[in-house]
Amino acid sequence: MELKWHGTAAIELTGEQGKILFDPFVPAKGAETDVSIEEFDSFSDIFVTHGHFDHIASIPEIVERNPDVTVYCTRAPYETLRKKGVPEKNLRELCFGQSVMVNGFLIHVLHGKHAVLPVGSPKRILYALGSPARGNLPGLLRDLSECRERGETVFYHIEAEGKTVSLMGSLNLRRGVRYPVRADLLVLPYNGWADNFAPAVRAVLRLKPKRVVLDHYDDTFPPLTMPLDLTPILGRFRGTMTALERGKTERI
């Protein structure tokens, strides 16, 4: 089984029987990560972790370009995508606690939890208003209002070819949920909090994965995103944690 990162939270898993894609997203103008919509044309099955715009905004165009693609998601993103014109035939609703087999991957749908998004601080507001990408703000604010998470962040646990991958939809975990531990690989979205370090440490210590890769740390929808310093968290888990490189294939 192999993994490839397409920027933001877009993760591709490839196995002997096919491949699947999570959270495809084309970054905003001026982003540090260059991704085109064509990168997502070869996928027949897309899984969504939650309904925020940086996880679903590109899906209507992907479906328009690829009319036979199936998008798996919970009720909130399902309703948003329908409003944005995605045909019902292309959508399959997921429920927490269920498992589905797709292209050789056994995918367990667990109830995750979204990060606690930071309140707009004066520093962050001044950064956004002074950014060369401030022209993105009207569209991004519209997308924020239209694409809601509604408490439906998914934690996917994937089994294939004798390996296990845990993929967090956001940098948080629910109390009372029994998440699988000791996965061969944990995909950790290093994004969402005012300070990502402490919740990342909590997640890794709770899940006890054999190896961790960071995604979602890149500056893909400026000026609402800012460059992140990964040095502290990579240092804390030196030897077991790495930051994904866009387009590079990782063997699991």
Image (spheres, grey):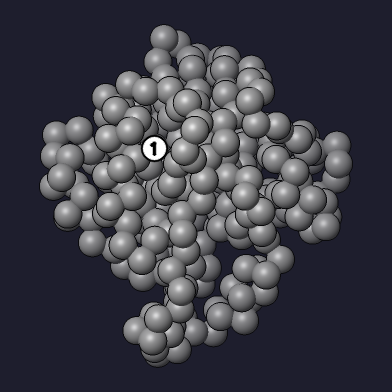
Image: 22 above or below 51: above
Image: 168 above or below 109: below
- Hey, what amino acid is under mark 1? Val
Furthest residue in direction front, as rendered: 176
Q: Position of residue 102 (x, y in %)?
A: 64, 20
Q: Nearer the viewer, residue 213 or 35?
A: 213
Residue 116 seen in render: yes
- Which of the 4 image quarters holds residue 132? bottom left
Q: Secondary structure at mark 1?
A: strand
Tell me: 148 left or right of 123: right
Quarter of the picture holding the N terminus:
top left
Q: In the image, what residue occupies the spot 46% across and 59% down?
A: 116
Q: Position of residue 49 (x, y in %)?
A: 58, 43
Tell me: 152 left or right of 204: right
Q: Nearer the viewer, residue 29 or 56?
A: 56
Q: Position of residue 100 (x, y in %)?
A: 65, 20
Furthest residue in direction right, as rendered: 88
Image: 2 above or below 122: above
Q: In the image, what residue occupies the spot 69% across and 39% down?
A: 73
Q: Position of residue 142 (x, y in %)?
A: 67, 74
Q: In the image, what residue occupies the spot 54% across and 84% down?
A: 135
Name the residue carrying label 1: 187
Quarter of the picture holding the C terminus:
top left
Tell me: 59 left or right of 233: right
